[in-house]
Image (cartoon, coloured by chain):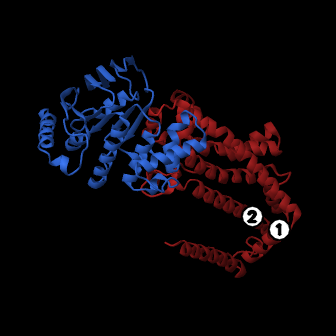
Amino acid sequence: MLRLDSVTRSFGDHLVLDRIELTVPDGQLLSVVGPSGCGKSTLLRTIAGLLPADEGTITIDGTPVAGVPDRLAVVFQDYGRSLLPWLTVRDNVALPLRRRGPRRAARHAEAEAILERVGLHGVARRHPRQLSGGMQQRVAIARALVCRPSLLLMDEPFGSLDARTREDLEDLLLEVHRADGTTIVFVTHDIDESVYVGDRVVVLSPGPGSRVVQDVPVGLPGKRDQLTTRGLPAFVALRTEVGRAVRQGD
Amino acid sequence: MTRRRELLLGVLGAALAFGACEAVSRAGIVRRSYLPPASEVLARAAQLAGDGAFLDGIGATLRAWALGLGLACAIAVPLGLLLGTVPVLDTAVRAVVEFLRPLPSVALIPLVSLLLGSGTGAEVTLIAYASVWPVLFNTVYGLAETDPLAKDTLRAFGFGRLGVLLRVELPGTAPFIAAGVRISAAVALILAVASEILSGFGDGLGIFIAQAETATDGTRDVLAGVLWAGTLGLVINGVLVGAERRLFAWAHEPRDAQRRFGPERQGVRA
């Protein structure tokens, strides 16, 4: 269980996160939504240990974490910058494994298996920039999954993809989540997306000084479908509720 | 423009320059002893290719060049990595570096000769001194250009400071370092030949040029030596450019920041 207790963070005089309280049970896919510039990314980076919190504590399973938590994986929006262009797709995916040091052949085998799993066939030896944006983001997801993370953080991962690719990747994420039960914190500014992928949606207020203003459990069936789920009255009601909370602060 | 057309135009330009030199000399506009016809210079340069003593000289120059450039890289790359990763250090040595860098290396030849004599030691020292800068600056610059998001990604996967340096910063900086080495290679050749010419004895292409100068019909030999120096520079540059294209194809692919902020940004300084 991931728990944020009164987490505060400023940049200079600019207060970004104001006493954030948040508990994420194991295996939950939590969507964090809020207007642009509300500190969603700062929140994610703070959880990832890339930015220290000024005040407050982050605990995982009751243990306070300082720095980068164990078995963490991240997927950023900008796959073009987070994938290493000089490595092949396979070596990019195998990169997190290098820390734990399985042998080269084992790393390659694991990387190739996970690439198949995210629907990438026959691209292991290509370089990231030879692939489309959607495929590159699949590579980034594969790289995040290869070390079997217990916590996966995603920062607007599908924000720069076209609509169709985005839907495919949302479904891929749901499939992976259903199979692995990884705890996922999914940051997005897209209200529909936050409801479609989330088990629960948390709405942050606009900055400065973002707080959690709404906490909405998503009671939709686990098995979701881009067309039918989005047409359900319950989905429409949820997106209205979340949308209203996001607009509240404007 | 296609590759072939570029090549064709290049050949055409060289042929025109050659023809102009030839014509100026043959028409008697300039005295032959000042500017021998280009064909005679070319013939002499070709003849030198069969001259064992001359080739030994080329070998000596290239040896000093390689030693000096190698030494420069061995100093500049680790130093650049250190300065690029420890900002405090960078600020501290900046004043010294900015003082040393603009000193024309050729002006140091008398000083170094005084201290180290005029043998290979002095020559290699001068070459190394002059070629340290482009590699050093490109290394520091390349490190600063490393994408923070790539570093964050690795940190989030649990890599420490050293892991990030070895897996992201160093490979990301490699094309910049290579461009620095290419610039330094040209600088090193200039210094190799110049220090030989000024010291005036021993072996090397510069010695050949310096000694030809004093002969009665020396202009032809001087120019033939210069032609060799130019050719060496051209070949070295070609080989290095080719190597960079092969090794760092990823840095030259489209839709890439490298295109706008390429490794070429640092200027040349001899």
Is the C-beta separation of discs 2 and 1 under 8 Å?
yes
Q: Which chain is blue?
A: A
Residue B106 vs residue A58, the one in the foreground: A58
Sequence-wise, which precedes: disc 2 or disc 1? 1
Give residue B48's mark: 1
Location of residue A245 with respect to A133 vertically, above or below? above
Q: Which chain is red?
A: B
Judge left or right: residue A81 versus residue A229: right
Q: Position of residue A95 (x, y in %)?
A: 52, 40
Q: Residue furthest right?
A: B52
| Residue B30, disc | none
Out of A45 and A152, give the one closest to the viewer. A152
Instruction: Give the Cα distance between marks 2 and 1.
Output: 9 Å
- Mark 1 secondary-structure assignment: helix
Q: In terms of secondary structure, where does tag 2 sit?
A: helix
User: Label 1 is placed on what type of residue?
Assistant: Leu
- The residue drawn where x is 55% and y is 33% is A100
**Seen in the image, is A26 located left or right of residue B256?**
left
Tell me the residue at 57%/30% (across/down): B93
Read off the residue under disc 2. B228
Q: Chain of mark 2?
A: B
Chain ID of residue with mark 1: B
Q: How would you rate the neighbour count of disc 1 (Cα within 10 Å): few for under 14, some for 14-19, many for 20 or more?
A: some
